[in-house]
Image (cartoon, rainbow, N blue to C red):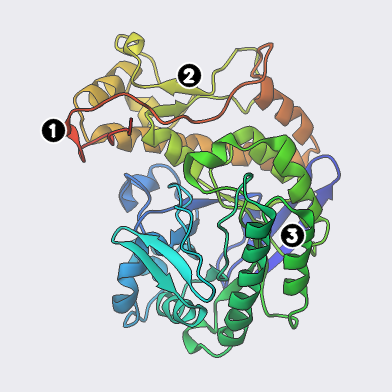
Amino acid sequence: MKFVIKSISKNSGRLGQLRIKESQELATPLLMQTTKGGSIPYLTADAFEMVSNEQQLLQLTLSTMDQMAESLALWTRPLSDYVGLPGHNTVLMIRDPCETTPAGGNDRDVMPLFTRRGKESLTATQYMEMVAKFAPDVYQGLCDADTNPESTKKRVQKSVDRTERFMNECYALHGKEQRLANSTLLAPIVGGYNTFARTQSIKHAKEQPAGSYGGYILEGFHTNGLAATTLSAAQLLPIVEHCLQQLEDDKPRLMPGAFTPLLTLELIRRGVDVFDTSYAYCAAANYKALTFSYTKDAVQHAAFLDLTDDEIKEQFTPLLSGCTCLACSKHTRAYIHHLYKTHELLGPILLMIHNLHHYLGFFAAIRSSIAADQLPELIEHVRLQNTDAEIDYRIEANAKVISKAAMGKGFIAAAV
């Protein structure tokens, strides 16, 4: 994996080019496509081509794909071919950023892996053996990321110590696994919201021989799922800035999680390079279409359109005026609300198409703003949306009840 900085600005962050193997260069700040079980949520490969036909970086998660390891051990073609999305690059991560990761199960020499079948425990050796079966283009090192803003100092220090033990084995085994010869390892940086612990984690990574890893993944800030949308910028940003000041410029920095658009912009301004689409999924899973504006206009915008609101049942307009996605070009708010009411499978498909299209456009606007050194102006526009108060981008679980007969069909049933 090769990463090159194209431009860097104190006010607007940095632009880069990421090349994985012999693929085309991917522009950063970059949006990884979050998957579940190897598939983009709600969408087939053909449906996703209606969103984008450009090369993507697929975010695969071990917690949703561990059952595929045995068959993948016999697979000789790229991992992206196996999941039905050929031609794309792959990043294998441990946890699903779309769902809350349960706490606990942190024994000394094993890491808990929460799958659909329940909790499993992996040693560092077992983890590397499993990763070798997947043979992804990029993968994260094993780490204890079970920390959040409420974690105690003792829990934070344990996460750092356990991660160091795990990574000592990962570094040693990375060069020995033949199936990982062309894979890039990401060094995890953990330590919760403790600057001393974060510095200790960074120091351990930088002590490794040159070429041991190709980038960084900053973990341990949240428990994934909707929790990431509620993080306090005042609490998170100083810790992230503290970490980034100690990292080399020529290695990409990843931060998984459903960060709000506003927090994402602030992280980009400080130098984070790669994010994922879990925010777009979390909105869709809770019946919300993204409607915030990332282009300057004089119209007031809301963060979301709630498709469960009865007031839109006779609104024969697109989800978002001016949007060119398939959902907005061919269908109306009233029709998609009808799909929700009747539990039709097409409903979440159209909603996910819109949200992904909108978020990809958002990142294209971010790159353009950085190139023009105008990211602060974009941040202010996203913050206020031409209103007098800061927009709330947090996603709350939709508490509306769906009958048991509709469970598992179309729009998912929200927990109450």
Residue 313, image x, y percentages: 30, 12
Pointer 1: what residue? 405
Quarter holding the C terminus is: top left
Q: Which mark is residue 198?
A: 3
Q: Quick one: 283 or 78, which is closer to the camera?
A: 283
At x 30% / y 69%, what residue is drawn? 67
Disc 1/disc 2 C-alpha distance (Å)? 34 Å
Side of 124 where 347 appears, left or right: left
Q: Give the vertical position of 26 relative to 98 (above or below).
A: below
Q: Quick one: 398 or 216, which is closer to the camera?
A: 398
Residue 384, image x, y percentages: 67, 19
Q: Secondary structure at mark 1?
A: helix
> Which is closer to the viewer, label 1 or label 2?
1
Q: Amino acid at mark 3?
A: Arg
Q: Please report whichever mark, 1 or 2, sits nearer to the chain's N-terminal start.
A: 2
Q: Which mark is residue 321?
A: 2
Side of 80 where 12 appears, left or right: right
Q: Quick one: 371 or 315, which is closer to the camera?
A: 315
- What crowding class fits label 1: few (fewer than 14 Cα within 10 Å), some (14-19), or many (20 or more)? few
Residue 376, image x, y percentages: 78, 32
Side of 208 where 61 appears, left or right: left
- What crowding class fits label 3: few (fewer than 14 Cα within 10 Å), some (14-19), or many (20 or more)? many
Q: Please report whichever mark, 2 or 3, sits nearer to the chain's N-terminal start.
A: 3
Residue furthest left as drawn: 405
Q: Secondary structure at mark 2?
A: loop
Q: Give the vertical position of 294 relative to 360 (above or below).
A: above
> Which is closer to the viewer, label 2 or label 3?
3
Picture quarter containing residue 115? bottom left
Picture quarter containing residue 244? bottom right
